[in-house]
Image (spheres, rainbow, N blue to C red):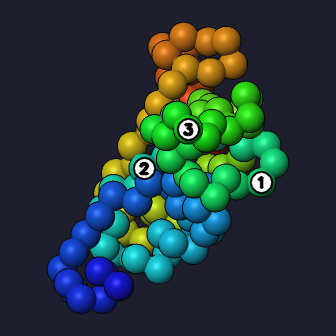
């Protein structure tokens, strides 16, 4: 494991892809306490089973696409991520920053509307 071999290594954990890969992003953040100064928040909705080839979700491999509508990036609070638990884990693990990303607009909203929805959701958690 890379983290075990390089004790000073730090990384920005992308909670979306940790979750999509079948891991618990909260447990993952806690596992790397003190080694993840930035936690990357991204929400998504995924229907059905996780594809065997994860790059298919973002259209990198055009040979095998996932079923239309089966995966969609979402504004925070509108998908499957447990955002309050992720924020708690980030705080408790010593992360100094969280970064919010919206890869593609969704829900028939523009990129700025999605960003506003994420911001409003985060404010509602206070």
* Depth check, front residue: 36 or 63: 63
Determine the residue positioned at 34% across, 66% down.
36
Determine the residue positioned at 36% across, 62% down.
95
In this picture, residue 123 sits left or right of residue 100: right
Q: What residue would you read off at disc 3?
A: 63
Sequence-earlier tag: 3 or 2: 2
Instruction: Please determine whether, in this image, residue 6 is positioned above or below residue 123.
Output: below
Q: Which mark is residue 126?
A: none
Dot 2: what SS? Answer: strand
**Pointers 3 and 2 in contact (C-beta within 8 Å):** no
- What distance separates the C-alpha of mark 3 from that of mark 2? 29 Å
Residue 34 image offset from top left, x and y in percent:
32, 75
Q: Sort mark 3 into few (<14), some (14-19) or many (20+) by Cα contacts within 10 Å.
A: few
Q: Sort mark 2 into few (<14), some (14-19) or many (20+) by Cα contacts within 10 Å.
A: some
Residue 97 image offset from top left, x and y in percent:
34, 51
Quadrant of the image containing the C terminus: top right
Dot 3: what SS? Answer: loop
Dot 1: what SS? Answer: loop
Determine the residue positioned at 57% across, 54% down.
53
Q: What residue would you read off at disc 1?
A: 49
**Residue 78 lies in quadrant:** top right
Determine the residue positioned at 52% across, 34% down.
62
């Amino acid at each position: 494991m890379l983290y075990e071999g390089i004790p000073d290594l730090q990384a920005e954990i992308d909670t979306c892809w940790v979750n999509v890969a079948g891991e618990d992003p909260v447990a993952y953040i806690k596992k790397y306490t003190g080694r993840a100064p930035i936690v990357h928040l991204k929400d998504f909705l995924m229907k059905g089973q996780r594809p065997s080839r994860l790059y298919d979700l973002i259209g990198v491999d055009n040979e095998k696409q996932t079923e239309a509508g089966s995966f969609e990036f979402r504004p925070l609070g509108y998908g499957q991520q447990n955002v309050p638990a992720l924020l708690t884990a980030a705080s408790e693990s010593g992360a100094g920053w969280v970064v919010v990303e919206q890869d593609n607009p969704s829900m028939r909203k523009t990129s700025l509307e999605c960003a506003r929805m994420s911001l409003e959701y985060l404010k509602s958690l206070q």
